[in-house]
Image (tube, coloured by chain):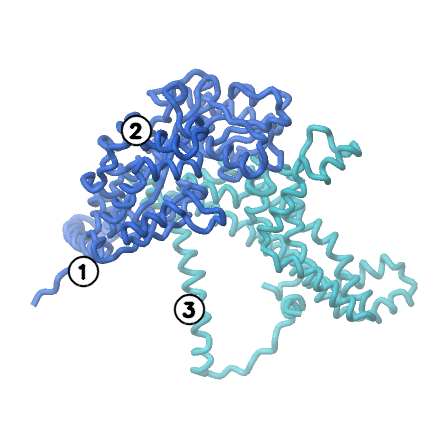
Amino acid sequence: MAFSAFATGTAQEQAPRRKSRIALLLLLPGILYLVLFFLVPLVSLVITSLQSPSALGDIGQYQTGFEWQNYVTSITQYGDQILRSFSYAVLATVFALIFSYPLAYFIGVKARPWPLLQNLMLVLVIAPFFISFLLRTLAWKSLLSDESGFVTGLKALSLLAPDAHVTGTPVAVVFGLTYNFIPFMTLPLYAALERLDTRYLEAGSDLYAHPFTVFRTVTIPLSMPGIVSGVLLTFIPAAGDYVNASREFLGGTGTSMIGNVIESNFLVLLNYPAAASLSIILMVVILAIVTVYVRRSGTEDLL
Amino acid sequence: MTRSIPTDPMVQRLIREARSASLTRRNVLTGAGIGAAALSLAACSTGGAAPGPTAAADKSSTDKNIKWDNWAQYLDEDKDGKTHPTLDAFEKKSGISVKYDVAVDDNNTYYGKVKDQLALGQNIGADLVCLTDWMVSRLIKLGYVQNFDLSKIPNAKNLTPSLQKVDFDPGRKKSLPWQGGFTGICWNKDKVPGGLKSVDDLWDKSLKGRVGVLSEMRDTTGLIMMQAGVDVSGKWADAKFDNAVDVFRKQVNDGQIRNIKGNAYLEDLKSEDTLAAICWSGDITTLNGEAGDKWQFAIPEAGGLLWNDNFVIPIGSPKKSASEELINYYYQPEVAAEVAAWVNYITPVVGAKEAMQAIDPTVADNQLIFPDEKTLSSVKVFRTLSSAEESKFGAAFQAVLLGS
């Protein structure tokens, strides 16, 4: 699997140090790429975030400045949405983990005797990727709309109040996030569990450990790299996602996440400094959360 | 030997800026330290009163290709939706080849895409663009569009008298209307058999959570302000706008308003997530044609809004006279009637109604396409906002959309 390298996180042995022009030459395209498409945009983003309104005062016109207050304004004005982004992302990650772990365990461990079934199930996990995720989200939007069979069915069973609806609620947004990012959780988990040596599990039960104890003390620690990379791959894009929460898709006015705020500041209000400062806030918070998380879960090799 | 300065406007501007910058550097360095110099240079380069962009030279006589950016569903199509009959006829007649591009989805987004090039006087790729009144007003104010040579557009005399005088373009020298429409209310006839009469009817308890409104600030707040008795075409105090936003916020927070959308509001009407909405007149006619005759449009009792999308020629376009020829073509009553019958919006061309009578008399009687004096007296045009007002009102409106 393509994810195996990421999941195991074992450091490669240091190659013998030798000054080589060829190595430098080979590195050059990569470095150029990083400078052009990462460093330059990042610097320009920081500069934009510190711009002040142009003296001429026309909408969407800004000049270079050092308006650090942009950050304060963004945080006070959009604190709710920032908080909401991260809580939705945490919820989506937790749900994705709960759904993915048994699935990955089944594919990677239980289905080992039947390679065909294993491959088939893996294809089923990846298959949705063949359709644009915008289309899939739009499909869910109509599946969850008021007059859809699903919602009318829930109402008929009195599981949903007669005037309640699903689209435009936090439930729909968290559902959408979970659904869209679940393969990013399943695949690294599978990559880790696929290499799980079942003899450890046998040894555990031979020593009279309860199956749950074996799971807790053997399986989980051994699949930890998979869990960590799965959580990262799900949490980071989910926190910055703006499609699911968008009013045009599954969200409503009460569900806007930081991505939606950035979008509206950038495209509608033409308030580029606010949009840029929010992007940087998002990056910094994600970086902080991820650093703490990786430290706590004891897999610094990943960083 | 002297070399001439390159003609590219961007290069010329750079040269201009380099010259002015070197002057300031010399002056400032004598007085203050290098840090201060750098700061003031930075201020000069972007904040200084740079002259507006200048129009590109016209190359229409040699290059017969133009590009026209417009909104979706805004030009007649044949049955397969592949070609535009009126445009094909124009190409055949004039020998000009037109690339018609549905590139405008939203005034703000389109502006955001092209504004930096416009500021430098560069060619944005489009030679004709149709944008809404208030955006055209901004473009004119900033000097981003070219002056028409009205002698090349003789048919401009067919412009409806009520649209000849607009505050943002006296004499219609830089913009000419393409199509217009009403903003009003609509409802699902099956689910709301009683129909609606006013914007306040949208806030009725029976429609809780099933009402949609538009994400265009002027449309939604404009109708709410009209309901409160404000004439949106005249001067009004900021407080009137704030009151409208308060009403809007309350209905959103109470869950009365289900969603706030741009063009996609039609999807909600179709899926019946919304049963009533603030909407654009032509869309409802088209929707009824597409998905069964289920919806009804009305101008609210307290009044609706009238808006227009206008042709403008961006400042950097080198195809001015070819573009003018196209505008002139569409200002013929027969052609205008053909377009109006397909797009279902109001044509600004006098005589189109008479021409329509010959094609399809029922369409000629449709008040939403050929409104009479009485209908027109029930609608207002949202007045032009200053930049400061636009920023302030826009931020207040977006705050509701983002739920804060």
Q: Colour of chain A?
A: cyan
> How many angstroms separate mark 1 from mark 3 (CA)?
31 Å
Q: Which residue carries the number 2 mark? A: B160
Q: Would residue A299 appear left or right of B374 to someone viewing this image?
A: right
10 Å neighbourhood of mark 1: few (<14), some, or many (≥20)? few
Mark closest to the chain's N terminus, 1 or 2: 1
Q: Is residue A214 visible?
A: yes
Using the image as rendered, state which of residue B215 and residue B83 is in the foreground. B83
**Dot 3: what SS?**
helix
Residue B148 sits in quarter? top left
The amino acid marked with disc number 1 is Pro
Do the residues marked 2 and 3 share a common chain?
no
Do the residues marked 1 and 3 share a common chain?
no
Q: Which residue carries the number 1 mark? A: B6
Using the image as rendered, state which of residue A162 and residue A100 is in the foreground. A162
Q: Position of residue A78 (x, y in %)?
A: 51, 38
> How many angstroms separate mark 2 from mark 3 (CA)?
58 Å
The amino acid marked with disc number 2 is Thr
